[in-house]
Image: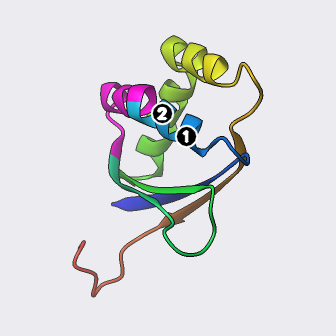
Amino acid sequence: MIYELRIYEAVPGKMGNLHQRFATTTCRIFERHGIKPVAFWEDVIGVSNRLTYVLAWEDMAQRERLWNAFQADPEWIAARAKSEEDGPIVARVISTFMKPTTYSPLQ
């Protein structure tokens, strides 16, 4: 099992739009494609305008296959375009792949 840590830095003033897109569309399309979110977080203290989430994958081959299918999904493409009609809502995406240590409870 590998985990993907994704951090989205929202365009100032667009954090609500980003939450809306995940809540109404992205998570549902993730589920349809078999993409498994572990959890989503927003900062309470520290950097504002940031959404952090973790996805669980069997391996990189599964990630590649499912993520590519998600990115090519016509509903996702349309929803992303609609959410960005007034301009981008994400300024930057940071993605890191991690594996549990031998002493992790996730083993």
Q: Which residue, as the protein is rendered here, is positioned at the far front?
A: 13
Residue under pointer 1: 16
Residue 25 is situated, as x and y percent measured from the top left of the image, at: 43, 25
Q: Is residue 8 left or right of residue 23?
A: right
In the rendered image, residue 20, in percent from the top left (x then y), is placed at 48, 33
- Can residue 91 be seen by looking at this rendering? yes
* Residue receiving disc 2: 20
Q: Residue at x 59, y 45 (%)?
A: 15
Position of residue 88 measured from the top left corner of the image (x, y, whole percent):
74, 33
Residue drawn at 62 percent across, 62 percent down: 48
Locate residue 68: give its quadrant.
Answer: top right
Is residue 89 shown left or right of residue 56?
A: right
Mark 1 in CB contact with mark 2 (< 8 angstroms): yes
Residue at disc 1, secondary structure = helix
- Local packing at callout 2 (Cα closer than 10 Å; few below 14, some 14-19, many 20+) is few
Q: Quadrant of the C terminus?
A: bottom left
Residue 65 visible from this viewpoint? no
- Rendered location of residue 84, percent (x, y): 69, 25
